[in-house]
Structures are given as structure tokens and as C-alpha cells.
Image (tube, rainbow, N blue to C red):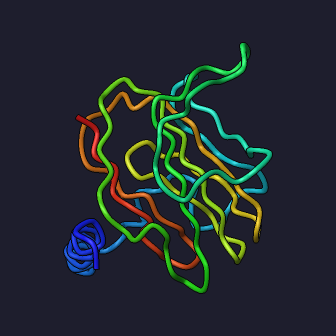
Amino acid sequence: MSVRTRTLTALAAGVLTALLVTGCGQGDDPSGATPSAAATSAAPPSAATTAPASAASPTPSPTPSASASTPVVDREIVVTIAKRRVFPPTGRITVDKGKLVRITVTSDVADELHVHGYDLGARLPARTPASVEFRADKTGLFEVETHETGLVLFQLVVR
């Protein structure tokens, strides 16, 4: 087992323990429990929700280039959910304040993605990648989860 795998496993265990103690707090979602037919966003105009043409790599990585009409994404975070398991395993991902972030999720079942604190969401059709894109303009620790299955995908740390 590699050092990275052991570190991610230890982080996942700590995060899951903390989340079991604190809970989701679904009451802070202003859209209510019913998912909308389209992706939702209560973030500033710099935020957007998109569905990419193809799935990206399963690990967070910066986007090397973008077309002239698309702003350059500073941090792309790609998550896959299969049989209620999250890959890469749940942990913390740190980004610098002011960076443009894209979160792309592919789930084997239909669900809804939610980024707490930024109040961003997106419908997750089964087996189809869906994304939210936003400017990380708030500092803190923000949980990113699915609402129907209640899976914590990761915690976003903005510094």
C-alpha cells in the first residue's frame, strides 16, 4: 500500500467520523428537498453549471487549456460514484481563494450534487457527467455531497 493510499484512507476515515458527528445539515439548502429539473446556482454571475462532452481523469488536476469562449479553470475536481462508493476516496481538497473551480461528478444512479456554503447544485443523471463551475470567493471548509444518497464526496477548503 502506497503512502498516498494510506494518507487518503486515513483522511477519509477522519472525515467520515467528523461527518457522522455533525450530519449533513440539509436544512441549509434554500431550494428544499425536491431537486429541480435543471442544474441550480445561487452563486454570483461567475458561477456556471455545465455538462462536459467526456469524462475527465478520476483525480483532481488543473486544466491545461480552454477554448477562447471558456475561461481557464484553475482547479478541476473529478469524482466518480459507483455502487455507493466514491472515487477518489472522500477527503479534503484545498484551493486558493479567487480560483475558478470545476467539479465534475459521474454517478451510476440519478442524484443531485450540492456544494454547501456556495449553495450550488446540479442534477446528476445516471452514468452522465455533470459539472458545477464557480469562483472560490469564500474562505472556509465546504462539504460537497449528493443529496439523494447522502454521500460526502469531499470537503473543499478555500484559503
In the foreground, 115 or 84: 84
Q: Residue at x 61, y 24 (%)?
A: 65
Q: Quadrant of residue 21?
A: bottom left
Residue 141 located left or right of residue 76: left
The x and y percentages for residue 91 are: 31, 64
Seen at 70% across and 48% down, the residue is 39
Q: Residue sitting at 67 percent across and 62 percent down?
A: 35
In the image, residue 30 above or below residue 50: below
Q: Residue at x 58, y 73 (%)?
A: 81
The reply, left or right, for residue 5 in relation to residue 146 is left
Question: Which quarter of the rendering shows the N terminus?
Answer: bottom left
Can you say whether 30 is above or below 43 in the image? below
Which residue, as the protein is rendered here, is positioned at the far bottom? 83
Q: How many marks?
A: 0
Give the camera-side residue of 5 and 86: 5
Q: In the picture shown, does residue 111 fall above or below 136?
A: below
Residue situated furthest front in the rendering: 2
Q: Position of residue 122 (x, y in %)?
A: 64, 53
Quadrant hosting residue 26: bottom left
Q: Quadrant of the C terminus?
A: top left
**Left or right: 111 as drawn, with respect to 96:** right
Q: Give x and y (percent) for residue 137.
A: 36, 27
Q: Position of residue 87 (x, y in %)?
A: 49, 70
Q: Nearer the viewer, residue 41 or 105?
A: 105
Is 84 located above or below residue 23 in the figure? Answer: below
